[in-house]
Amino acid sequence: MNFPLIMLIALAVTGAIWLFDIYFSKPRRAKEAKEPALIEYAKSFFPVILVVFLLRSFLVEPFKIPSGSMLPTLLVGDFILVNKYTYGVRLPVINAKVVEINQPQRGEVMVFRYPEDPSLDYIKRVVGVPGDRIVYRKKRLFINDEPVLTEDKGEEFNYVKSGLNYVTAKRLAEQVNGQAHSILIHPDTPAIRLGDVRPFPSRANCDYNEAGFSCTVPEGHYFLMGDNRDDSNDSRYWGFVPERNIVGKAFMIWWNFGDFKRIGQAIN
């Protein structure tokens, strides 16, 4: 569902009804006559829709985390806020950038339109920016031939997948571009599921084998991975994220029905 488009249509319809009343209906209506219900509703809803539309389009937008691909950073059911302007001001619906502000940096958690189906919003961590060479070998991440700092503290992380499957993973500490966060590794899972790798634009920039892969990020694109490394559908499988698909930077958890302690937590 294209919610921004729906809001834009609602804004246009309620605004048009209000203007029609101002310039055509009201001058012809008797002073004591009651305002038609349709016009009354349009005048009531238009300012509300306008404020919500502007906030969601240019300032912050709420999202709900639907899957465990970003565990342990984000839990299923987290409601998060996304900064819509930090990566530049974009026109709603068409998502065209009109004002340049900042570029995504490695280590940041970003919401974007899924390249294979732009009607879907995905959230992953940026690990590669234009020009970077990303290597993932035996579950170790390298950026431009430098190993990413990873520390194994011997911690486990347990969670339930769909179908009530109980999963135990290793929790590691990782730093990407100075951004400290946790990742999950499933020791018995291969580094790359070769059968899940699809054809994608600039696929020639990547080399895959059973030990992992290497990719060079093309200009105007980004490489993203989930923190739940062995249970994430990300750039390893469907390719690079074009700059035009960027939605914004995730920065805060504003609600979780199952764990009130998560409310207000910053997303690192």
Image (cartoon, rainbow, N blue to C red):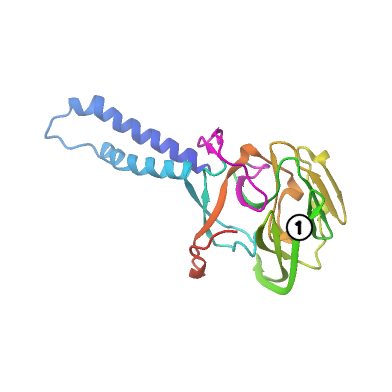
Choose top left, top right, bottom left or bottom right for residue 154: bottom right
Q: Is residue 161 above or below residue 37?
A: below
Choose top left, top right, bottom left or bottom right for residue 212: bottom right
* Image spot of residue 225 (x, y percent): 70, 53
The residue sitting at the left extreme is 32
Q: Is residue 105 above or below residue 263?
A: above
Identify which amino acid the numbered label 1 is placed on: Val
The C terminus is located in which quarter?
bottom right
Q: Nearer the viewer, residue 106 or 241?
A: 106
Find disc 1 in the rendering and name its residue. 148
Label 1's element? loop
The span shown in magenta is 88-117
Instruction: Judge from the rendering whether residue 67 lies leftward or rightward of residue 79; answer left or right.
Output: right
Instruction: Judge from the rendering whether residue 111 lies leftward or rightward of residue 167; answer left or right.
Output: left
Q: Is 104 included in the stretch rendered in magenta?
A: yes
Choose top left, top right, bottom left or bottom right for residue 219: top right
At label 1, counting other C-alpha atoms closer than 10 Å, the crowd grade (few under 14, some 14-19, many 20 or more) is some
* Image spot of residue 64 (x, y percent): 54, 56
Q: Residue at x 67, y 56 (%)?
A: 178
In this orientation, does residue 145 appear?
A: yes
Q: Main secondary structure of the magenta part?
A: loop
